[in-house]
Image: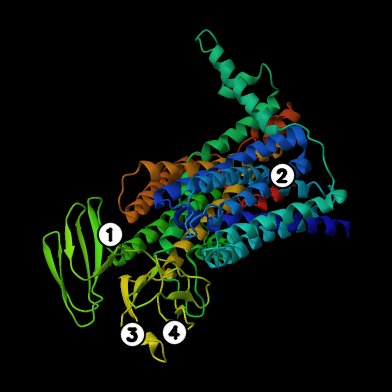
Amino acid sequence: CLNCLFIFFIVVNEFCERFSYYGMRAVLVLYFKYFLGWDDDFATTIYHTFAALCYLTPILGAIVADSWLGKFKTIIYLSIVYAAGQVILAVSAIHDITDTDRDGTPDNMTFHISLSMVGLLLIALGTGGIKPCVAAFGGDQFQDHQEKQRGTFFSIFYLSINAGSLLSTIITPVLRAQECGIHKQRECYPLAFGVPAALMVVALIVFIVGSGMYTKTAPQGNIMVKFCRCVGFAIKNRFRHRSSAYPKREHWMDWAEEKYDKLLIAQVKMVLKVLFLYIPLPMFWALFDQQGSRWTLQATTMNGDFGLLTIQPDQMQTINPILILVLVPIMDSLIYPLIAKCNLNFTALKRMTVGMFLAALAFVCAGLIQLQIDETLPKFPSGAEAQVKFINMIEGEAISVNAGGHVYELKPFDVRETHTDTHAQVCAHNLAFFCKGANSIRFLNGWTSKLNVTPAAEGAFSADRPSFVSTPRPQFKIMDASGNECVFTQSLGFGSSYTNVIPPTFAFGENCAASIRPIMDISPNSVHMALQIPQYFLMTAGEVVFSVTGLEFAYSQAPSNMKSVLQAGWLLTVAFGNIIVLIVAEAATLEEQWAEYILFASLLVVVCVIFSVMAYFYTYIDPMKIEAQFAHPDSDELKRKGSFDKNKVHDPHGKQRKDSDSSREGDRAAETKM
């Protein structure tokens, strides 16, 4: 029963923390684009900078926990930092704070950007810092004889991670799509960030409540620090003795023998051998993490109407955790056994190669879909052009327009859209015109008096400028000063822009809406979001084959006391993958998004080939036997068995040898959603 209690506290803490992180990240790139007003490239750059920081800070968290504060205090202190960051981010999204003119647009964007960056920095420090601590802290709660209970705990722990990820990516986009605000209604980013912030506070409180039941181990020194010092000394000592007068040694790490024992050096060699294989891996994560940036931005230009359901662009990310829960058992119980029955030696490194190739195929699919989307997007003016729309609102009278030397004839309520030089003179008579608004609704009042327009289900609406409407078929209430009311229903689709002209002949009554003239500025998105499902399927299948297998391989090839070093190395590959996205997004001069997708796919294919060559020459080892050489130095038999053929490491089904070390299960819990 005591075990059940602390399992409850730790699992609930992890569920809330993962809900908080993935929920916030699901809407982050849209917040950058639509609230802060950044373009796609800069929004992508900041998004991946944040993601990279989230995977760099775990090293700091592990060092602090193992060398100074211990896991429990590290989780507490960094969770406070984490929660503070979430709260600050939520506050930064409240547009009313600086909206002095009450038009729905913040008047001091520098304030909101600064607050956002502070919040994201604290979140990166918090989520990364506690990442290596929570699972290991859970494992510390069990005695050596409680292996079965420990396994049950990590299974529940793993499910809580994926459940938090799945629910948050469903719920927070719905919250984001709501309208909120004191003076002017806008998409409710404060709510979308506020709920994850509240969940993080709950996670902290729940974890603290169970503090009296936990087993808290004292910090005993960090193996990563010892590993780095050993490597550093070997490099420094080798440099000191670089002269030919000194005899060469079998391995460059042997230069550390003057200070460190041979067992530690042998363990470091094993880890370095695996870390060398990690070098190509960041390219996979460079593609994988774009699900939350480029793919989400791609979904904003697509149709999310699934009949009974309306899917928001940032909700498409839910496909990933759903497919993970489906594909992991299918791979383990069906696909791998079938491959084994075909007598194919489908080793861990071969699986990882296949996973990388599947991710490349996913980006090829994304590029093909982008080509279809580009054909449906409106043509916007170049940097040397201006775009002007003319609307003739004179009942029964045609007018002429001279725009940059081109003369147009406009019949009543006819529309003419033109691209012209920014310095061209535009001459017209008896007309109204305005600049084109994107993904918005504008009401143009041609009636004899002032009218108020309010969406029936979305709160206040300002008709003096383009306003965003989230529902595909909204109802608008048009009212005059006397309280007369007209209900106007409009089918918008997704990503459209309309100007609704209220003509001088408008009159309240039973058929009042019939006289309102909707004019389409931008046609609705016609490419359906369902077309993204194949690319999500390929990417998730690649993740399952690559990520799960990669960690199993790494832990089977490293000594038990240095598995945390490999965990840190694995997280670093994710961080460097996000850095690659930053470099490509800023350095690449590709004007077309589909070309960038194909570029990433091509780079991963090249890396995949390089990795397959490295894997071919890799020789599998048994760490326990190598370590035993130093425990029993006189045993020639053990020395001869220190390394062996790679085909003997796996069983006939290509299944990786299980590791008996209990810490492996803790790392398994975070194999997919880290």
- In percent of the image, x 62 and y 65: which residue is there? 167
Sequence-wise, which precedes: disc 4 or disc 2?
2
| Mark 2, residue position | 133
| Mark 1, residue position | 380
| Mark 4, residue position | 486
Residue type (three-letter) at the residue carrying disc 4: Cys
Sequence-wise, which precedes: disc 1 or disc 4?
1
Query: What separation in Å lies between label 3 and label 1 (alpha carbons)?
Result: 30 Å
| Mark 3, residue position | 515
* SS at mark 1 in the image: loop
Q: Is residue 586 visible?
A: yes
Query: What separation in Å lies between label 3 and label 2 (alpha carbons)?
Result: 65 Å
Residue type (three-letter) at the residue carrying disc 3: Ser
Circle count = 4
Residue 279: image x %, image y %? Answer: 50, 38
For label 2, count other residues whose C-alpha is less than 10 Å away and answer few (under 14), some (14-19) or many (20+): many
* SS at mark 4 in the image: strand
For residue 459, above or below residue 357: below
